[in-house]
Image: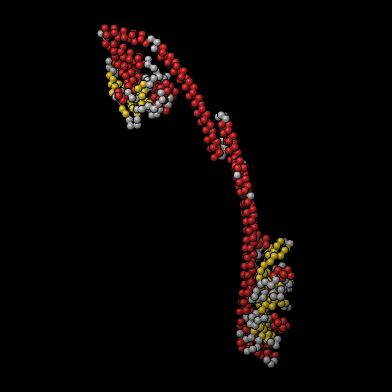
Amino acid sequence: MFKLQQISLQKKLLIMMLFLYFPLPVIGWIWYEKTYYAIESNAIDSSIEMINQVNAHLETYFSEVERTMLPILASDDTATFLNHLNDDPIDPITRYELSYRIEKELLSKIMLNRSDIYGISLISDRIKATSSSSFMLAEERYPSYLKRIKYSDRFTIMGLETTPSSQVIGMAMRFSPPQSGLKQGMLIVDLKRDEMVRIIQNVHVGKTGFIWLADSANQVIYHPQTDTPSTMVPEDYLKGMGRKQSGTFMINTPQGKKLVVFIRSDRNDLTLFSEVLLSELNQKIVTVSRISVAILVFLFLLSMLAASGVVYSLTKSLVKLLKLMKRAELGDFTIRAPSGRGREIDSLFRGFNKMVEEIKRLIEIVHVAELREKELEVKKKESLLHAMQAQINPHFLYNTLEFINSNAIIEGNEKISNMIVSLGDMFRYNVQSPNGPVFLSDEIRHIESYLAIQSERHSSLAYEIEVDRTVAAGIPAVRSTLQPIIENCFKHGYEKHKLRPGYISIRDSVKDDNRYILEITDTGKGMSLETMEFYNKAFSHGSPEDLRDNRQDESRRSIGLFNVHTRIRMLFGEPYGLFISVSNETGTTIQLSLPIRSESRKENYNELSDFVS
């Protein structure tokens, strides 16, 4: 069992095919032999049935002849003829008158209706006859016929007889008419062979087969292949028949084996023979059988060849795939499986190619991620350096702003004082650690400083922030996310259309799907529906490069928004980020979606430190 497991799949399939296909020809040959024997038996049975029908037809024919003779047997003239001739001799004139009356009244009428009867003779015990043909010939045949008749009141076929004009089949019967008491006579009927020959010749056995007839003395009565009817039945035929009443036997001829079927009739003591070459008897059936076997053998070989080809192709493809997989295990991901090897194998090869391509892609992604991680580390160090540089002397900047604020207060310029205070708050927020985590409440305080400065610049500006500061204090956010959105309101909602800043509102809401929504609304002129759908599609699936390729002008003004969206999406994943819910002539509303609870790791903040608008 262990050795069998070590054999390759290709050899296993080959062994299986040998065990499967080798017995099939043997079974086919046995089936052919059994079929041939069955066909031969059916052919023999058919020949026996046919010769039985011919024999029955002949017996019917002789029975009809017997019934035709009944008027003679029951005639008063027949009884008178037998009584007078068997008693004291009568004068020739009386005998002549009686014979003439029998011939004219009985014999001639019967022969007139039966053209197959050659002659009818009536003979008394004293061998005195009257006949429609020759009474002398009848008297000569009487002694020999009397010895051969076995039963009274029943015709016996005496065989072939030679008359002056032709050969006939003689049949005789010993009888006693009811009117004659115990006086017996003999009725001899000579039949022409034509009717019997016609019955026999109407039956065809194969192409060259035939039926012939012999009497009880084994003398041939009719044979289609000889002109001498008096020929005797051959010895080998008699040996094959033995003492059987009917049966079959085979004889060898130069043309091949010949089937001989014989039957001895109990009724008329004739023997019918049927001869036919065995090859002719079942030639058509055997030919069809042989053609069927040849077709089956051809289909078997064809299917075996096709199956062998399929198995070989399958195992060859599997071996090829195994070699490719071993190369892939060694790290060669440039290999590709060939195509065009069948639907299943081709599908398997395509799957292998996709797998190799996916592994290669994932390796490249991991490699790029490693490079990016190293790049982020470098940028982190650079940002930390910049932050350190920015913090070298922050007290100088703070003191300067405090000095300007003090002078503004002394001069009574409250406007400048408020702007300086707001600017200082923004400055302190921006110079804090850029990689540190922030919350939405920090962003809200930062944007309040920004809007305070803008409201001092634009007297027409009114803003409103309706945010639950307690909830916002627990919402994680990304540094500098609100300022680009508010700046977008000023630049594209008002300044682009030469409108004075009007109204900006910031409101929050909580959704059932664990999302915190912050809505920033302005009253400037919004964008077209097509442009809004373009931006929302970019927020869902695109990238900044897609925006640059498709809409150069819009991409320059939307890259800050997209950076905000990208940083949120990279830190928190889907479905968080930006979405433009409304934009028309009355204003624009941008939704900022953030998670209520953050499961991100702290290092994600560090990776996003350079995505600042």
Q: Nearer the viewer, residue 435 or 522?
A: 435
Q: Tag count in the figure?
A: 0
Q: Position of residue 484 (x, y in %)?
A: 36, 20
Looking at the rendering, which quadrant does residue 547 occupy? top left
Q: Residue at x 71, y 67 (%)?
A: 225
Image quadrant in which the C terminus is located = top left
Coloring scheme of the render? secondary structure
Q: Residue at x 65, y 79 (%)?
A: 155
Q: Position of residue 375 (x, y in %)?
A: 47, 20
Q: Position of residue 143 (x, y in %)?
A: 72, 83
Q: Residue at x 36, y 8 (%)?
A: 396
Residue 4 in view of the camera: yes
Q: Nearer the viewer, residue 576 or 428?
A: 428
Looking at the rendering, which quadrant does residue 210 occupy? bottom right
Answer left or right for 171 relative to 387: right
Q: Nearer the viewer, residue 361 or 241?
A: 361
